[in-house]
Image (cartoon, rainbow, N blue to C red):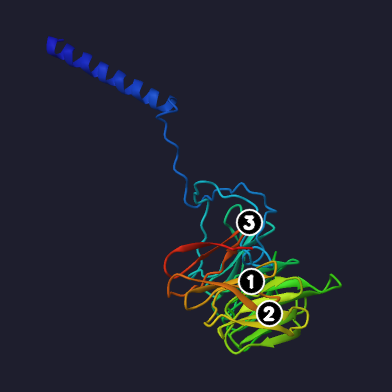
Amino acid sequence: MTASAKRMLVILIVVGATILLATFLIRTNPITQKTPRKQENQPMILDVDPKAGWPIFRGSGDLRGMADTELADSLKRIWRFKTGGPIRSSAVIDDGLVFVGSADGCVYAIELRTGTQLWRFQTGGEVEAPPCVVGGLVFAGSVDGSLYALEAKSGLLKWEYKTEGKIHSSANWFYAKDGLSLRVLFGSYDGKLHCVEGNSGEPLWSYQTDNYINGAAALSDDRAVFGGCDGLIHVIKATNGSRRATINSNSYIAGSAAIRGRRAYVGNYDGTFVCADIRRAKILWRYKDADLPIFSSPAVAKDVVVFGSRDKRIHCLRSND
């Protein structure tokens, strides 16, 4: 073997040894070892209490939008679920399931831990109204004018109640004095707040306004409070639908009012946010920082009120309780 051939053999041996050593280090060193890429169809598991819930729009019957838990400092997506159209409905959570409506006309039940669809129910129109869950039933309104009562675990239709207008607002509920009879309240574009028996869908009463009702009715004690496109804050007796008071906000009210104590908080179309005393039927204060509409529903804590506006800002006010 010539000298040049010997040198070439030595070089090949050194290069081969280097490659083998590098391969060994990459496989065994945890710092350089790469994590296998997660498959797209393999859902991550959300580690949460399956009993944790948010079963109604804004979290509670008074629609204050307050949660007892805290969010992490940074958030990451665990799963995502795609429907056949835009989602304008807020989601609600009950017993480990997420319920949400879609512009594809369906109400969906999704497993909270995995993002897997359990069932879907097809209505006759877009579903923009957030669902409401109580007593094993999901109540969801559609722009087809119907409120649907669905079994939460199966999605089977229990009953359908037809109004004379679109339903954009979420339902709310309370039990009658006997503690057994479920009452469900919801507004419609027929200008009425409807009250039906929750287990049968039988109509109990309706309250007529002078324009569309977009927002949900908030409940406190025996009173239901909601704003309408007639510009009024309506205060009615929840058990029979009789009027207690109307309070003029001077512009359309598209969002839902929130109640804390004897005060109701809501924004209107001309960009004014108001605080009203629902017992004395008077405006306590007004806040206006822009002429753009306020469509959002407020979150109300002990000392502050937070809401969004079409001016692209989040506003935080002292409630002065």
The answer to which quarter of the image holds residue 140 is: bottom right
Callout 1 crowding tier (Cα within 10 Å): few <14, some 14–19, many ≥20: many
Query: Residue, x 23% and y 19% (percent of image)?
Result: 12
Query: Residue, x 51% and y 46% (percent of image)?
Result: 73
Q: Which mark lies nearer to you, 3 or 2?
A: 2
Measure the C-alpha gap from mark 2 to mark 1.
Answer: 10 Å
Find disc 1 in the rendering and name its residue: 264
Find disc 2 in the rendering and name its residue: 235
Q: Which mark is residue 149?
A: none
Instruction: Kindly check if marks 2 and 1 are in contact, taking CB atoms under 8 A apart as contact.
Output: yes
> x, y (%) of residue 293?
46, 75
The answer to which quarter of the image holds residue 260 is: bottom right
Depth order, front residue of 40/78: 78
Q: Secondary structure at mark 2?
A: strand
Depth order, front residue of 234/114: 234
Callout 2 crowding tier (Cα within 10 Å): few <14, some 14–19, many ≥20: many
Q: Secondary structure at mark 1?
A: strand
Instruction: Kindly check if marks 3 and 1 are in contact, taking CB atoms under 8 A apart as contact.
Output: no
Q: Earlier in the sequence, mark 2 or mark 1?
A: 2
Quadrant including the C terminus: bottom right
- Residue 270 in view, yes or no: yes
Query: Residue, x 47% and y 48% (percent of image)?
Result: 39
Query: Up-down: is 17 above or below 153?
Result: above
Callout 3 crowding tier (Cα within 10 Å): few <14, some 14–19, many ≥20: few
The answer to which quarter of the image holds residue 289 is: bottom left
Instruction: Kindly check if marks 3 and 2 are in contact, taking CB atoms under 8 A apart as contact.
Output: no
Find disc 3 in the rendering and name its residue: 67
Residue type marked 2: Val
Q: Secondary structure at mark 3?
A: loop
Measure the C-alpha gap from mark 3 to mark 2.
Answer: 25 Å
Depth order, front residue of 180/137: 180
